[in-house]
Every structure is written in structure tokens, then in C-alpha cells.
Image (cartoon, grey):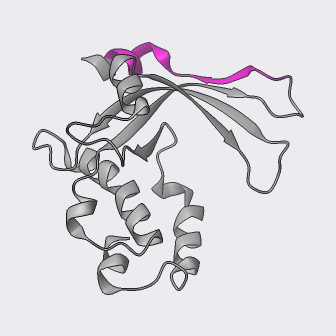
Amino acid sequence: MLENLNTGISFTDALPWWIEIHENEDLWCKDRQVGLEVFSKPGFETHNFLNLMENPVATMGHHAIYNNNISYEIRCINKIVHPRDPKLTDYERNLALHPSIQFAWAHSYADPEFIYSIPGVIYHHIEEYNNSRSFEPGIRVVKRIGQKLKRFFA
């Protein structure tokens, strides 16, 4: 993505590549998602940032794009990370940069300072519930809280 952004390929022109990447399930971790904290900065913290700092528990809803009958609730513990944090692993840094690059590329905003200045949020999935219409809502699909949670805080 960063190469596409730096070479000036438009998001629209790269759409076939984008679809291929997102359909390759081997590339994606299924136990976490990433997001951005775009508007928080020194002297101004968003409500979302303040809430995540006070209580790092989050619930995300996922609804399938092509089928409104498919719905999941994902309970997470978040970690706010800054791409310039020297204590991050390369993997965590790439996770922090991914949504910034995606955001910048989709909005034709190629300023490298922007990409490296936005905190990312890594949402570690702890529990997943299938709330689809074909299921009884609220059936737990995945429970990962045991050892994973202990490692997260270690």
C-alpha cells in the first residue's frame, strides 16, 4: 500500500489489487483488527481516545457488506500504538501504519508526516458472538480470554 501511495497510483486504479489483497485470507490475522485515532493530538483528545485510555475494553459490530443477515459482535481489548514508538516491534509498527496508509491513500493524502504521526489502535479479539439472523443472537463463536489475555498484560 505504501508503495502504491508513494508512486501516485490512485486508489481507484489499484482497486483490483486491493480486492485481491483483501481476499487473500493468509495475509490477515483473524484475532485482531486495527483502527486509527486520527483527531487526537496533544491538547485535544477525542471521546473515543479518552474512553479507550480509561477502559481498554471495546465492542465492535461487524455486518457483512453483501448480506444483512450476517452479523457478529467482537469483544476486544485495545492497545493504542504510535508508529514512531521505538519500543514497538516491526509487526506492531506495521499494524499501526496500515490504517494510516489506507486512510491517506483512499483520500489522496500522501504526506509522509501524516502517515507517521497518527496513532493506531490494535483491537485484540477476546470473544466473538454470532448475531446473525440465521442463528440465535448472542451465541459465542470464539472464546480466547484465557492465556491470550494473560500474555497481553504480561
Quadrant position of residue 15: bottom right
Compared to 20, does 130 lie above or below?
above
Q: Nearer the viewer, residue 127 or 146?
A: 127
**Which residue reaches farthest right?**
134
The residue shown at (53%, 72%) is 18
Q: Is residue 29 left or right of residue 75?
A: left
Q: Residue furthest left?
A: 86
Point 35% across, 77% down: residue: 5
Residue 141 falls inside the magenta stretch: yes
Which quarter of the image is occupied by the N terminus? bottom left
Judged left or right of residue 1, residue 125 is right
Q: Position of residue 130 (x, y in %)?
A: 74, 29
**Start-end of magenta stretch:** 137-150
User: Number of labelled discs?
Assistant: 0
- Residue 54: name its quadrant: top left
Q: Is residue 93 above or below residue 131?
A: below
Q: To which quarter of the image does residue 71 belong?
A: top right
Residue under the point 22% across and 49% down? 83
Quadrant where the C terminus sits is top left
Left/right placement of residue 90 relative to residue 98 reads left
**Residue 153 in the image: x percent, y percent?**
29, 18
The verdict on residue 143 being magenta is yes
x then y, percent, for residue 66: 79, 57
The residue lying at 22 percent from left, 54 percent from top is 117
Relative image position of residue 140 (x, y in whole percent): 69, 20
